[in-house]
Image (spheres, rainbow, N blue to C red):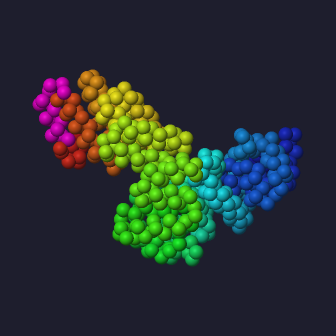
Amino acid sequence: MESASHAGLAGPDGEPMPPVERVVAARLGVFPGGLTAASVAAVLELPLQTTSCLLDALTERSLLTVSDGRYEVLDAIHTYAGERVSSAEADDLRARHAAYLLDLVRRADAQLRGPDQLRWATSIRHESDNLRGAIAWATEHDQRLALELVAGLSTYWWMHGLVSEAGRAAERLLGALGPVVPAGLEEEYLLAVLHTAGSGRPDGVEQARVIVEELVEPFRYPVTVLLWSIVLGPFVPAELAADVLARQELSTDAWTLAAVQLCDTSAEAALAEFQVVGDRWGSLLALDELGQVAAGAKEFKRAIELTGQALLLADELGVHEEAASLLCRRGDLRLRMRELPAAADDYRRTLVRAKQAGRADLAAAARIGLAKAARFSGDLAKAQELALVALSRCPDDWDEADLAMTEALAELAAIAAAAGRPEEAHSWRLKAGLAPEQYRSAGR
């Protein structure tokens, strides 16, 4: 069998590839998630025009594919790179690549909270695999750089519901760093702790609190105030929470000031300020908060309107999980208003989004909502069918399964009662009252 050193690395007429193309091809193995002429030029320190010509030549040799100016590296190049590039040179290339990505992340972060956020979010999304690789490499070889990458991606990750991804990256990094906070990177360390705590891993929370108390100036990363308030705010003394928000009021950054308003329960003012700076994510959060406040005040029509506005922004941002949650909540509101066809439509759309987002809890809530809509419309047979499906699809391996199971059983009891079957309704109520583990052990 022909070795990877020669397979596919010759011209169309069988002539060997020119040395400069071989050198470049070997070094492209550092790009696990695709590349552009600009990224290669920066990492390999080549003129942009020369780089474009070399990438086009490699594409003609079927070693790269290209679409809309972005190249994907084929397996032959990765194999060739493994044979031709020493470990020392590979580390040097990865360091340069990580530095290039950090520069991109910094430039993007400044734009992710303004009117051009969709374009910059797309730029970061295209580099997702490269960024994961860079963070993994830097976690082992350059923790300061890794911290800056993790901190710089904070807005993008939380804006797009990638809290678990942020938590995994931060947890590995904090494990490599240990408890010592690198000098000058206190806020970056704080953001890493917030990521781990926000994704359900609370290690380091007390240390985060100490860092917050010692940082007397406004946060350098605008997103820090929002994440701190979401993750730690409810668990710290009210005096500290008020002090942290008061410090941020000294900021000159408009987005930070809007976030302070949101964290200080002034969602109406926050919405106006987020809209001025052109930020969809902040506006979405403010609209969601206002919608929940309206629902709590039983202003259901206004709550539906506000939730719908938030949903439009979630769709623009492409955040399926948030969109699924908003759709399900609007379905619940429409159900209370007895807008049954509209509620059922929201629940069906929730099922689609929940599948895309991998949210079994939202899928269960949508199925139960559909059963209720059918019951309220008088179709008890359909309602029972839907409730039984909801019950049968409550898996045991997610946190909200017990609640979803109880709600499905309660709905089956309500359906039986509406159908004039009191004994069956009583039986379902008994099952709903059982501890979930007892019900599981008894069988469904």
| x then y, percent, for residue 218 | 53, 69
* Magenta stretch, main secondary structure class: helix
Q: Does the magenta stretch include residue 222?
A: no
Question: Residue 254's quadrant in the figure?
Answer: bottom right
Q: Does the magenta stretch include residue 430?
A: yes
Residue 401 appears anywhere in the view: no
Q: How many marks?
A: 0
User: Would you place residue 253 above or below residue 378 in this image?
Assistant: below
User: Would you place residue 401 above or below residue 91 in this image?
Assistant: above
Name the residue at 45% across, 46% down.
287
Name the residue at 45% across, 63% down.
228
Left/right of residue 179 with respect to residue 156 in the rendered view: left
The quadrant of the image that shows the N terminus is top right
Residue 255 appears anywhere in the view: yes
The quadrant of the image that shows the C terminus is top left
| x then y, percent, for residue 118 | 61, 46
Left/right of residue 212 with respect to residue 397 in the rendered view: right
Q: Give the range drawn in magenta.
A: 418-432
| x then y, percent, for residue 431 | 18, 40
| x then y, percent, for residue 197 | 42, 62
Name the residue at 20% across, 48% down.
435
Seen from the viewer's position, the closer of residues 199 and 71 is 199
Left/right of residue 35 with respect to residue 427 in the rendered view: right
User: Would you place residue 226 above or below residue 344 in this image?
Assistant: below
